[in-house]
Amino acid sequence: MKQAEPSAPSLESANPDPGSAAHANPTVPIISPHFCSPNPVVIEIVRKVLTITGDKFVVTDVNGNMIFKVKEAYFSFHDHRVLLDAAGHPIITLRRKFNTAHERWQVFRGDSKDSRDLIFSAKRSSMFQLKAKLDVFLAQNITENVPDFKVKGNWSERSCVVHAGDSSTMLAQMQKKHTVTPLSFGKDNFTVTVYSGTDYAFVVALIAIFCEVNTPRAGAHASGV
């Protein structure tokens, strides 16, 4: 398994809204403690609807410095994405399971697909839902009776919130960034606030999955989980 020691970029702190729901502080690092900040931080994501290079997401700080990119694997039997650091090293691999009604995605360390390297999985909360919701289960949550995290959002507005389990504690929130430049055609631009103690690589992975499961694509899902 190819895996580089992740390095944490310097990110600008954010000031959370004091009137909003409780924010995380602290939480357990999911991908790596390197990606946890003691202060809230802001990151920006550009999602390319159509791409030739395979770079589906480019993640930067507010100054435009690249932190991550999510690359789509072409000519692969399995539908998967790879989260790379700024140097191009794989941090995690996101793989969609076939024949699942709830469109389950599994996330592994590095470029692995070995079950021993599974970190977490995420799936739609239900087959039919009016609002976009994901249930997220850590690898050690075998029964999956209760999700460890939840993502709730409005896909038409390109917004979502990451919660700790069924609580009101917010770990991160994403909003659409409105741009009018010609270069924004064919792209979605997001601003993400990641609250203190939260693994922002984990948040980026969740947002990537959230976008994938809410983007219409050819083919229907068969029965399963």
Image: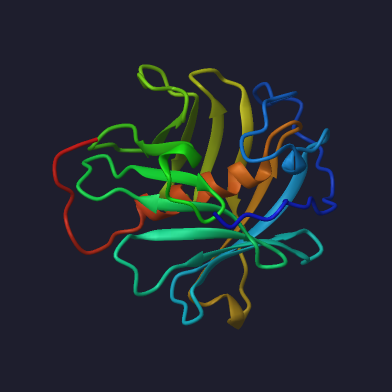
The answer to which of 144 and 19 lies nearer the viewer is: 144
Q: Percent from the top left, x then y, of residue 33?
A: 74, 37
Q: Percent from the top left, x then y, of residue 174?
A: 59, 46
Q: Is residue 33 left or right of residue 187?
A: right
**Residue that extends furthest to the front in the rendered view of this protein:** 1
Tell me, yes or no, if residue 26 can be seen here: yes
The quadrant the N terminus occupies is bottom right
Q: Is residue 58 left or right of residue 95?
A: right
Q: Percent from the top left, x then y, of residue 82?
A: 52, 59
Q: Percent from the top left, x then y, of residue 31?
A: 63, 40
Rendered position, 134 above or below 99: above
The quarter of the displayed image where residue 80 is located: bottom left
- Which residue lies at the image location 37% right of the left edge and 22% below the top edge? 144
- Which residue lies at the image location 52% right of the left edge and 42% below the top edge? 160
The quadrant the C terminus occupies is top left
Q: Is residue 39 left or right of residue 71?
A: right
The answer to which of 217 and 55 lies nearer the viewer is: 55
Rendered position, 3 above or below 46: above
Q: How many marks?
A: 0
Tell me, yes or no, if residue 174 can be seen here: no
The answer to which of 10 and 211 lies nearer the viewer is: 10
The answer to which of 16 and 53 lies nearer the viewer is: 53
